[in-house]
Each structure stands twice: as structure tokens, then as C-alpha cells.
Amino acid sequence: MTVTATSVGESDQLKPRIAPGARTWARRLVRLVPAAAAALSGLLLYVSFPPRTLWWLALPAFAVFGWVQRGRGWKAALGLGYLFGLGFLLPLLVWTGVEVGPGPWLALVAIEALFIALVGVGVAAVSKLPGGPVWAAAVWIAGEAARARVPFHGFPWGKIAFGQADGVFLPLAAVGGTPVLGFAVVLCGFGLYEVVRLAVERRRTGEVRRAAAAVGLLSLAVPVVGAVAARPLVSDTAEDGTATVAVVQGNVPRAGLDFNSQRRAVLDYHARETERLAAEVKAGKVARPDFVLWPENSSDIDPFANPDARAVIDTAARSIGVPISVGGVVERDGKLYNEQILWDPAKGPVDTYDKRQIQPFGEYLPLRSLIGAINKNWTAMVRQDFSRGTEPGVFTMDGAKVGLVTCYEAAFDWTVRSEVTDGAQMISVPSNNATFDRSEMTYQQLAMSRVRAVEHSRTVTVPVTSGVSAIIMPDGRITQKTGMFVADSLVQKVPLRSSQTPATRLGILPEIALVLVAAGGVGWAVGAGLRARRAGDV
């Protein structure tokens, strides 16, 4: 029998060959995986926000973000962080371009995503430190703290806490406000990645790093245990009696920037709904309210300068027979104010609150001369800047102390807290969302109010011109709400409370502490990197 051996050359010919071009494309695709993962995890974070109730998706979103940033150099971390920010903020803030086009929306997202890009650099820097999830979560909160303050007095929309109104972590808002609530969620997400990473490593190598595993497990467990432990801080017990409140949503003639283009139409709508409510009260169909809350801009013309507007409000107040908080645009000493006016049925206007945190590019135009040179239409839309109020607004309405937080102000920690420390027993967030049509903006803002209710243990009412108006208990539950672009009113007996949560008493201190933790972690990482380079040079 003859045996024929296959030559080496013939054997090589039998092996599959991969063309050099195919190898290049494969390498490029592998490099694209982290970038795609960063953008998609940002999108996943967006999906966790209202109006959806998928709050838990924030955890895998941060787990993936932790994976893509682990051990990256600063340039890669910056780019991946920016992609994560775009994936998150582009859909979250799309409502900002509903009436003014995509330019302002894209510009806002481009700027805000820079903060998240810098956070990505910090997360990458601390990713290999002992206790990495803790440092990384603190870095994220430091980024939120910066976004809430600069530029133009900040833009805190998209704080992680505002996506957790339906989540198990919500009670932590009463412990340390939005920074502590957000920190817990982000820590849990980074802890989830750490647990998965160590499990994969153990399967591959058979080794278990007990300290790292303990940190990962504790990062998952401590926030959940903390939230359960904080439950006793959440209560809707009436400490100072109750008040029967009426929230009036009068609707607007049309959605969009020209919602108040018909002189006095918005005011007439709210007066008409109040008079309809008064008729139902008189007929015994609805309980008589102790006071009535109208939305921001519910008087579309200045009632101090226009006798006809004043007469309409007087008639509405007399018909219902109780005080009304009226939202108006008021000119005083040549300055414009976004004002809430306490209107007594017998005495007329007796108190006012001027909005303090006014909206850039909406209520005032920063860099007016530069913006005008670029786009004259924008300067035409914001012809005169609003002025800022200087004092908290707490109206005494039939004995109840009602703190006013006007629309955009609800996103800022300090504005809400100042009303509670000034004695507010409940909070009202009068808003005007007609400019944003049927976008998700109104639901995002409603979720903020739910978080604020738990944070300060106060009933929160949300009267909105066109919806969604709502009544929120101190435990964050919505007990009544309206539809959008309908005239409606809500009447309910609500608890009044005067005790202060730890979050109210501590104020900014938890945020400062977390910023210091972030700075310590980044400093440690930078120092360790410098020492490693020096050792390599020796």
C-alpha cells in the first residue's frame, strides 16, 4: 500500500484566507462598538425618563457607560462621554425646538453634552481605583452640579433624579435632595457593571477579587437598602390641618408661541372656567375651595395697567368668593416681571411674587448684540428682557401658606427649598406649557414636581394653562390630573405640613460633599497616573 503525504504548501492552500481589506474593516467595526454602545446607552437613559415609567432602565444605561469608559485615555473618554450625552439629551430636549426650529435645540444639546463629555473623562480616570463605582457616581453628580449653574445660571433639566418619580429610590429625595437620589441611581448602575465584570473575570480566570466584589455588591445593595430605610420620611399626614384647593386650567386659543396673540383670550378662558367652577360649587356638585390657583401667564395682559383685565379677574374672584393666585406679565418702573398676584375677592391684588430663575433665550436674551447679529428674528421674539425677582414667594391664602415656584424654577433645587424654609406648608408650580404643544416637556416637568413633593414632604399643585395640571401628595402620588388642551379644574382637600425633611434642612451640603468626593477621586487617579509615569521613566 502506498501512503501519499500532503506537502506543507498544499496544507497552507487548504487554510481559509482573510483578505487584508477584510481585516481592516473588521478592526474598524470593533473600534466602533464602544462608540455605538455609548450612544445607545445614552438613548436607554432617555427611555427611562417620563412620560414612560421605565425608571429602572437607568441602571443598565450606566452599567454600559461604565463599561465603555473603563480604562480609557482622556481623549477617547471625552468622545465616548459626548456620544452618551448626545444619545441622552437629543431626544430628551427635542421639545425645545417645537416652535423655534431645530437650531436652538441642537445648540443647547451640543453645549449640555460637553458637560457629560467631561464627566466621561472623570469616570474613566477613577474607573480602576478601589471603590470605582463610588468615585464615578460622585463624578456624575459633580457634572450635574456644574450644569445646574453654568452657563447663564444653569440648565438642570435631565438630572437623573427627575427620571425616578416612579422608582424605588424616590424616598432618598427626602434624605439629601436630588443629588443624593441621583447618586444612588448612578452608583447602582456602575455597581451593576462592576458585578458583571467581576463575574466574567472569575469565569475566565477562576480568580475572585474579594474586595472589588464586595464594592460591586455594596454599590448595588446600599442604595436599595437606603431607599427602604428612608420610607418613614415619606408621609402625607396632615400636620397643620388641611386645605381644599382648586387648580384651574383654562386652556389657550392655540398652541405655540402665539398662544396669547388674541388680546385677553387666555385670561377670559381662565375666568370662564373659574366661573363655571363657582356655579358647580353653588349647585353643591363640588366642594367649596379655600383658594384657587391659576397658572403662569393666565392673565395674558397686565391687570395693573389694563382696567378691563382687572375687571375680569375681580368678577372671577367674586364669583368663587375666595382668593386666587393669578399669573401675569407685569411692567413696573419700565421693567417686565413674570409675576404671581394674590387676588382677594374683596380687596383685589394684595401680594405679589416675581419669578427669580428666569429662562435664558425665552424670558431674557443673553449676549443680545451677538445673537442679533446672527439672527434678528430671535431678538424680535424676545424684544424686552424680563427682570428677576429677589424674594421668596409665600402667599397666605385663607390661613394656608402656599409657596410659589413658577414653571422653570421647579428644576432648580434652591428655588423650591427657599419657599419651604420661608414657611410654605404646600407648594404650587404655576406653569405655561402651551409654547411646547403636546411634547414630553409637560410630563418631564410634572415628574420634577413629584420629586419635589417627596424631597420637602409637601403637597404640590401644578396649575398649567394647557395641561397637564395635577395635584400631588407629599409622598409623590398624583391624585388628580387633567388632559392636555382642555378647560378643566381640580378640587381636592390636601394636607398642610410644616416639618422639614433632612433634605430641606441640609440644603446644598449633600451636593457639596459629593462634589468633594468626586474631586478627591479624580485627584487620586491623576496623582497615581503621574507616579506611574515617573516610575516608568526611571
Image (cartoon, rainbow, N blue to C red):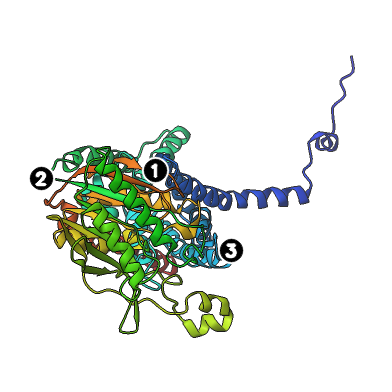
- The disc labelled 2 sits on which kind of residue? Glu
Residue 419 pos. (x, y %): 20, 61
State the residue position of label 2: 239
Front one among 57 and 468: 468
Looking at the image, which residue is at 18% across and 66% down? 347
Q: Residues within 10 Å of mark 2 (few under 14, many from 20)?
A: few
Residue occupied by mark 1: 194
Q: Give the position of the N terminus as an image quadrant.
A: top right
The image quadrant where one finds the C terminus is bottom left
Which kind of residue does numbered mark 3 sit on? Pro
Q: Nearer the viewer, mark 1 or mark 2?
A: 2
| Viewer can see residue 524 | no
Occupied quadrant, residue 406: bottom left
Residue 74 spot, x, y in % from top left:
48, 64
Q: Which residue is mark 3?
A: 102
Kindly report which numbered mark, 1 or 3, lies closer to the viewer in this rendering.
3
In this view, the mark in front (3 or 2) = 2
> Please, is residue 453 above or below residue 75 in the view?
above
Disc 1 to disc 2: CB gap under 8 Å: no
